[in-house]
Every structure is written in structure tokens, then in C-alpha cells.
Amino acid sequence: MKLNRQILSKHMVILATSTILSGCAVTEVAVNLAKTGNTEQTEEKDITNTHLEANETELNSSSQLKNNDIIKDNSNTSDSLVLPEIKKEPMVVANPQYKIGEPYEVFGKWYYPERDLRYDKTGIASWYGDEWAGKLTANGEIFEPSLVSAAHKTLPMPSVVRVTNLENGKSLVVRLNDRGPFVAGRIIDLSTEAARRLGFLKKGIAKVRVQILAEQSLALEREAKNNKFPLLLSNEEMPPIIADNVPQVNLDAITTRKIKSLPKNRTSAIELLAQSRIGEVIEIPVTETKIWVQIGAFYNKESALSVLDKYEKMIGSVSENLHNGKPIYRARLGPIKSVEDADIILADVLAFGFEGAHIIVD
């Protein structure tokens, strides 16, 4: 009986020892698997990091990698340590220059930059802002939406233009330093601040008149060619205006007619020039305007009429104006009730084959 108990006790000890050893083996295997898993995870992250470093430019634009997803090895411990890694954004360095530029193509349409000191056109203005903040403009400056500036398709950079909101009479002098807008039917793209001052920030678009200020633009051109670029502040002083070969005229005249005083709400050209400081808003009387889609302008009236005959979807008319002292005939469609309708008609006219068509306000 006693012998049986001893044998039974030995079997129990052996069984317990085997169980303990088996448990240790299982634990060791689990630890090894865990370490192997961590190693594989670390290797996978390291491979990912190598790939990401090789494509750092794409990362900056897509922002797909989060700092807390990057794992680095710590040789002093068996576990992986999660550390944040700060990715430095590439520094944008301004390199401003005076620029007119060669002809260029955007979305299949060609544009021809030129130094046009008689530029005076109407159309629809839009604005752009934070999505372009900190990026280089077309002439190498850094775009700041909180400052007064604008983009134009063809005028030199920098140039100075007066933009008048024909819907509320607000008029603003703006400095051009970028190209755009590349949307059919838009004549100028203003910065956020410029659009706010002209009163169409919430609406998004406005009927405007854009007039180049020749003397101010020439002054900026001289400064830019000497590598001088004033800040785009609302209270910046314009470079001194220097007129070339201005004849001196002395005129004495006596008249018996009574001079009538000008209406108080009328702003003379001299007063406008005196207030032509970038960012300063003045107000002029609001006149009623209508929207048209101009198919083309011709020196021959018959040519304008023949263009209208080709486009039979809408009744058009021919208006006569002066261009550089010569009569010019504009073939146009309208008047059109809204900018949205004008956009639709313009798209159809462009598709029809009249590549020079655009929206005007008259």
C-alpha cells in the first residue's frame, strides 16, 4: 500500500514537472513570436519611412503620413518606441522680377502677354485666397491673401490697375503680380482682401471695369527693373511718377462765360489719379450696366454682321465704338440677365468655334 502511494507520488511529480516545462515552452514561444512580430513591424515601418523620404515632395502635398505613425528602433530595449517626427516643409523663397512673359497655354487656350498701356476693359471679376497662401506668384513674389493684389492673364507684372465694382461704385487701385484667372468669362482674379474692399467677397463675383494706370505702372516697372519691389500694403507709397519729354505750356485765357460748379458726387480724372494709392477705396456714382457676350470686334461692319449670321442660336447686335481713334464694330449677344446665363452662352459660343469670345459689361 505504501509502495503504491510512493509510485503514485512519483507519477504526480513527473506530471507536474512536465506541465511546468510545457508551460515555459509555450511562454517562450509566445515571447519569441511577439519579438518576431515587433521586428517585422519595425522593418515594415523602416521600409515605409525609406519610401516616404524618397517621395517627400508628394507627402507634403497629400499629408497622408501622421507623425505618430513613425516608429524608430531603440537598441537599449526590446520594445519599439513611438516617437514623433517633425517633417520640415520646404521653404518658399521669393525671387521677384519684372515679367511680361512669352505666349503660354493653359487648358488648351493660348494667352499672349503684352505691355498695353491703354488697357481698359469690362467683365466679371473673381477672387482667390487661402488655398494659394504662401505660394509663389507668377513673377516670383509670395502670395498673401490678406494684402491687396490681383492676377491678370496678359498685363505685365507688376502693373497698377484701377478695378471698379460697377454694382456698388467702389473703386480700388490694385497691384498685379500673378497670372489668371483661367476660367472663361473672368477678366481678373483679386486677392481675398481686395475682394473684401470692393464688396463682393461673399458673392464671389462682380461686374467690374479694369483700367491700367499707365504712369503708375511705368513707375513700378522702373523700380522692378532695379530690383525694387514695394510691399503690397494698403498704405504703401507709389514710386515717384516721372514723365518723359513733357512739353511746358503756358496758357492764359479769359472767358466771359460763367463756370458751372461740378456736381458734388462727380469725381474728376485728376482727383482719381491723386487718390491712386494701392489699396485705397474710393466711391463713384453707380450707373446701370448690362451683360453681353462679345463674339468678336472688327474694323469692318460687314464682318461683324456675318459673324452674327453664323451663330443662329441667339439674336445679336453690332455696336460701334472707337479703338485707337478708329471705328470698331463689336458683334455681341445680349443683353443677358445674369452672369450664370452669360457663362452658359459663352461656353456654347466657344464650343461653336469663336475662340476670342468673352463677357463684357456695358
Image (cartoon, rainbow, N blue to C red):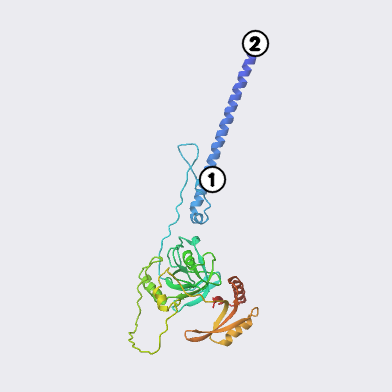
Local crowd at mark 1 within 10 Å, few (<14), some, or many (≥20)? few
Q: Position of residue 87 (x, y in %)?
A: 46, 51
Residue identified by numbered label 1: 44
> Is residue 361 depicted above or below 11 in this figure?
below
Q: Position of residue 340 (x, y in %)?
A: 60, 70
Left/right of residue 247 with respect to residue 195 in the rendered view: left
Q: Can residue 198 be seen?
A: yes
The disc placed on residue 264 is none
Q: Nearer the viewer, mark 2 or mark 1?
A: 1
Q: Amino acid at mark 1?
A: Glu
Left/right of residue 69 with respect to residue 345 in the rendered view: left
Q: Amino acid at mark 2?
A: Leu
Q: Can residue 100 be seen?
A: no
The quadrant the C terminus occupies is bottom right
The disc placed on residue 3 is 2
Q: CA distance from mark 2 to mark 1?
A: 61 Å
